Amino acid sequence: FPSHDRGRQGHPAVAFTYDISYSFAVIEFSLERNGARKMGRFMITHDGSTPEISEDFITKGDTEILFTADIVGSNVRVLYSSSSNGFNSTFKYSMRRWS
C-alpha cells in the first residue's frame, strides 16, 4: 500500500488521484493521527465532470480529517482537510477501479 505522511492543513490537499477514464472506484483505507484510528472505504463514481463520494468507516477516536473529491483535467482527486490541531497522520489505501 502506498503510505503518505500528512501534515497539518488549513485547506483541502490532494491525498491521491486516479484517471478519469475509470467511472467507478472503491478505495479501502486506514488512517492514524494523534492516537486516533479510522478504517473504512470510499465509493466514488462520476459523470465526467462531477464526482460523488460516499464513505463508510469505523473509528477509535476522532482523526479530525474530512475527505471530498473533485475532477481536475483528466484526474479524479480525493482531497482531505484536517484541523490544525494534533500531529501528522499516516494514510494508507488500496484501490479497485473500473469503467
Image (cartoon, helix red, strand yellow):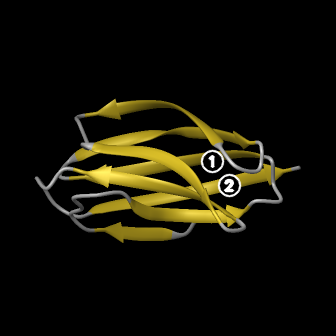
Q: Are marks 2 and 1 in contact (CB under 8 Å)?
A: yes
Image side of residue 19 versus residue 34, left or right: right
Rendered position, 51 above or below 6? above
Q: Which label was assigned to residue 95?
A: 2
Q: Give the x, y percent position of residue 90.
A: 35, 62
For this rendering, which residue is in front, 37 or 18?
18
Image side of residue 69 versus residue 48, left or right: left
**Of the residues shown, which amino acid type is indicated by label 2?**
Met
For the point 80% across and 47% down, which residue is it? 23
For this rendering, which residue is in front, 70 or 99?
70
Q: What residue is shown with label 1?
A: 27
Q: Give the x, y percent position of residue 71.
A: 62, 57
Image side of residue 34 versus residue 45, left or right: left
Rendered position, 45 above or below 17? above
Q: Secondary structure at mark 1?
A: strand
Q: Quadrant of residue 51?
A: top right
**Of the residues shown, which amino acid type is indicated by label 1?**
Ile
For the point 73% across and 43% down, which residue is it? 46
